[in-house]
Amino acid sequence: MLKSEYHISKMDCPSEETLIRMKLESLSTIKSLVFDIENRKLTVFHSEENPEIEEQLKELNLGAKCQETIVAQADEINDNSTVQSKLLWTVLIINFAFFIIELTTGFISKSMGLIADSLDMFADALVYGLSLWAVGSTVIRKKKVAKLSGYFQLALALLGISEVIRRFINFEEVPDFQTMIVVSILALIANSICLYLLQKSKSEEAHMKATMIFTSNDIIINTGVIIAGILVLLTRSKYPDLIIGAIVFLIVVRGAFRILKLGR
């Protein structure tokens, strides 16, 4: 068994990881891929020399450079996929559940902050879902799903931004700050539990680290919506809610473009 280590200068998020997995999964000589997004490092375990691995990576234009290829030790490939899958499924379910909860309460309370946060939860659930999708499915089918998911997310985000603009211009009721604060606190607790479970796993796998980063970002956004709710209470104004909503919608748009990149 051989081990090749690559430095990939433009790999900084789980979108690039999924893109690389989809690009390399058709090569039968590859036995395992280990990602380290934080250090922009990819380790490929393969059964024999295969120059096509480097060729496929270079086609992605992510700045991939092979640093070394050596003989791998038998105990180096540590497959914790079952445990990791369970954790990722837990995070996915929680994100999707709060997408429904925040979207519903957002419309009821007239809070764009909650609606935007719900779409951010939905965006994360999409990324986790794509990573966990059936291993046996074809690359073409995966790309189609990624493309459809990206366009759907982008459409929702742009619709949300247009609604924020409309509410800025027109007279609108002040959102229900109590619902904003209570639901965001619940989402904050849920994301904190997710982060605790992920950190408890002590996994060094990149997709697990990426999930921790996503969850940490969600905690920051949840906190932002809570602060916006408090400012709505203190100022009796709609603007803190609209501002946080606009910021989160822009984050969702950025995520949508990353997902669309997977469908190319």
Image (cartoon, rainbow, N blue to C red):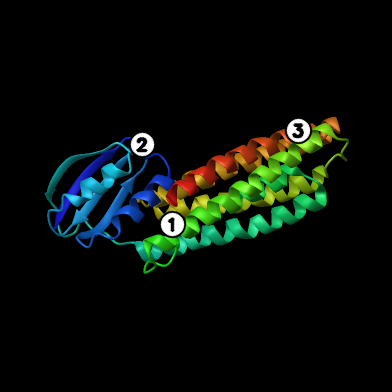
The answer to whether residue 188 of the structure is visible from this angle is no
The picture places residue 153, in percent across and down from the top left corner, at 59, 50
Q: Earlier in the sequence, mark 2 or mark 3?
A: 2
Labels 2, 1: front one: 1
Mark linked to residue 125: none
Q: Amino acid at mark 1?
A: Lys
N-term-proximal mark, 2 vs 1: 2
Q: Residues within 10 Å of mark 1 (few under 14, many from 20)?
A: many
Horizontal side, residue 245 vs residue 197: left or right:
right
The residue tagged with tag 1: helix, strand or loop?
A: helix
Say whether residue 256 is visible.
Answer: yes
Question: Quadrant location of residue 24?
Answer: bottom left
Residue depicted at 52% across the width and 61% down the height: 90
User: Horizontal and vertical percent for residue 62?
Assistant: 33, 39
Quadrant hosting residue 243: top right
Q: Give the side of residue 145 with respect to residue 234, left or right.
A: left
Q: How far is disc 3 from disc 1 in space, using C-alphas? A: 38 Å
Name the residue beneath numbered marker 3. Answer: 240
Q: Which residue is mark 2?
A: 10
